[in-house]
């Protein structure tokens, strides 16, 4: 089984470049179903297994995908021919479900399997379906599939209110509404930077989307879209993981391309703990300085609150800060699975419902641990960088879903890290044409 080996104790120093955002590029590639003419060129595409899956999904639907550089794709959907997403791929990754909205808008019908992904808690798609039904779609759910069709007259703009914050639901409805007749208002919309990035891509293709990044998005439907060029925003979760890795090793790391406005809660909490954080227009720097760090409390919330995708990595950092810190998870009910693995490394953590009490210890020790999900993998790597001795991290299929060559990037910063299947670490995901 592939594994990462880390001999902890090295301080991280240097500059590392942020990759394109996984949670942004996946719906953007799904949106590439929409244009009826012209090529789209997407840049800063991260080489990840999740990206490979969504690429295979849209190729199966008839989108022509070409790699023009290792981080750039050319897409053409002029010959789209299939409204049925391959269920074996959709069940692997939740983000694949975002093809439902654009398929409905483009074909007037769609069949998509109910999604899979990390086992971090219930993530129902009822709000996705509610929004699409408000646009006029007729939907049936059964035997693990969603079958949807548009009645004669097409999708029509509507006022939609989401009962709960939903990133995927907001994206699905946005992509359907851009080709609906009339105006659509999405109330209680998700506000993540990835929503803004998708809106910018849709607008570049000829859509009229306003208000992305606020809780009300207004969309004026258009008759058709065309191909466009777009550069994916940097991955704020990858950036946060590297900042926390620098902090836990008392290092000095500059993450080039990072956007501080995307990480306001994390930067505020790092500063509250006593970490030196400097941000500028080109990136963010965490600099180790001689001071005693303080325990802090965090509570995950939908954006712009503290991101649930950085909760595990922050917990790893808090394990070595003297005193008691509280970590409260409000987004997913099953996102403390990394706790038992951190305990194997000597962490003192007690879970009480949705709150974990983290009592800082003088040091962590290397251990054999397994990532239960993507961000748990980031947390275990973060902890291992500071632990005494060698840590052996398994479950790398989770890590490969969201971190581009994390071994190579950490090694460039001075980490003593290797991967036992190095030959596959930099394998190409896309076919060069």
Image (cartoon, helix red, strand yellow):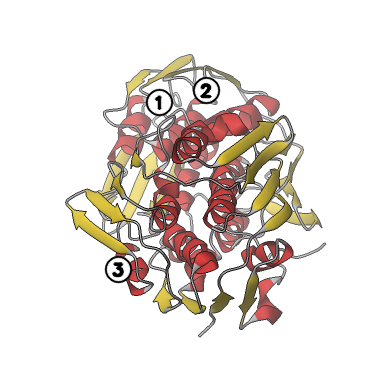
Q: Are marks 2 and 1 in contact (CB under 8 Å)?
A: yes
Q: Select label 1 or label 3 by which is in front.
A: 3
Q: Is disc 3 surrounded by few (<14), some (14 to 19) or many (20+) residues within 10 Å? A: some
Left or right, 2 with reference to 279? left
Q: Quadrant of the C terminus?
A: bottom right
Q: SS for tag 3? A: helix
Marks 2 and 3 sit apart, C-alpha to C-alpha, by 39 Å
To which residue does mark 3 refer?
340
To which residue does mark 2 refer?
212
Sequence-wise, which precedes: disc 2 or disc 3? 2
Q: Are marks 2 and 3 in contact (CB under 8 Å)?
A: no
Residue 390's x, y, as percent?
A: 52, 80
In the image, what residue occupies the spot 35% across and 23% down? 188
Sequence-wise, which precedes: disc 1 or disc 3? 1
| Foreground residue among 266 and 259 | 266
In the image, what residue occupies the spot 74% across and 54% down? 14
In the image, what residue occupies the spot 36% across and 67% down? 342
Sequence-wise, which precedes: disc 2 or disc 1? 1
In the image, farthest residue toward the left: 353
Marks 2 and 1 sit apart, C-alpha to C-alpha, by 8 Å
For residue 231, above or below residue 346: above
To which residue does mark 1 refer?
189
């Amino acid at each position: 089984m592939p594994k990462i080996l880390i001999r902890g104790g090295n301080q991280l120093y240097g500059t590392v470049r942020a990759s394109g955002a996984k949670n942004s590029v996946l719906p953007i590639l799904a949106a590439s179903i929409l244009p009826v003419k012209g090529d789209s060129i997407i840049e800063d595409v991260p080489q990840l297994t999740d990206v490979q899956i969504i690429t295979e999904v849209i190729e199966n639907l008839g989108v022509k995908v070409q790699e023009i550089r290792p981080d750039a794709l050319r897409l053409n959907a002029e010959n789209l021919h299939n409204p049925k997403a391959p269920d074996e791929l959709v069940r692997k990754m939740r983000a694949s479900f975002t093809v439902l909205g654009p398929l409905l808008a483009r074909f007037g019908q769609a069949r998509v399997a109910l999604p899979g992904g990390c086992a971090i808690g219930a993530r129902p798609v009822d709000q996705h379906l509610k929004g699409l039904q408000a646009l006029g779609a007729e939907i049936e759910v059964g035997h693990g599939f969603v079958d949807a069709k548009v009645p004669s007259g097409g999708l029509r703009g509507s006022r939609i209110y989401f009962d709960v914050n939903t990133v995927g639901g907001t994206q699905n409805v946005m992509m359907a509404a851009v080709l609906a007749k009339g105006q659509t208002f999405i109330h209680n919309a998700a506000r993540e930077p990835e929503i803004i990035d998708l809106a910018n891509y849709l607008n570049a293709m000829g859509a009229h989307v306003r208000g992305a990044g606020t809780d009300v998005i207004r969309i004026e439907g258009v008759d058709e879209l065309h191909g466009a060029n777009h550069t994916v925003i940097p991955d704020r979760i990858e950036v946060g993981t590297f900042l926390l890795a620098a902090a836990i090793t008392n290092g000095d790391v500059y993450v080039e391309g990072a956007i501080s406005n995307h990480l306001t809660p994390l930067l505020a909490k790092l500063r509250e703990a006593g970490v030196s954080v400097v941000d500028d227009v080109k990136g963010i720097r965490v600099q180790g300085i001689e001071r005693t760090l303080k325990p802090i409390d965090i509570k995950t919330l939908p954006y712009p609150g503290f991101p649930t995708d950085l909760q595990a990595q922050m917990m790893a950092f808090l394990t070595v800060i003297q005193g008691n810190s509280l970590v409260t998870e409000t987004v997913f009910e099953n996102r403390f699975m990394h706790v038992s693995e951190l305990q194997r490394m000597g962490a003192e953590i007690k879970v009480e419902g949705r709150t974990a009490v983290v009592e800082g210890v003088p040091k962590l020790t290397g251990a054999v641990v397994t990532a239960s999900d993507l961000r748990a993998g980031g947390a275990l790597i973060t902890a291992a960088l500071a632990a005494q001795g060698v840590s052996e991290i398994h479950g790398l299929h989770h890590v490969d879903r969201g971190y581009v060559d994390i071994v190579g990037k950490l090694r460039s910063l001075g980490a003593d890290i290797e991967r036992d299947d190095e030959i596959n670490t930099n394998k190409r995901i896309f076919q060069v044409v």
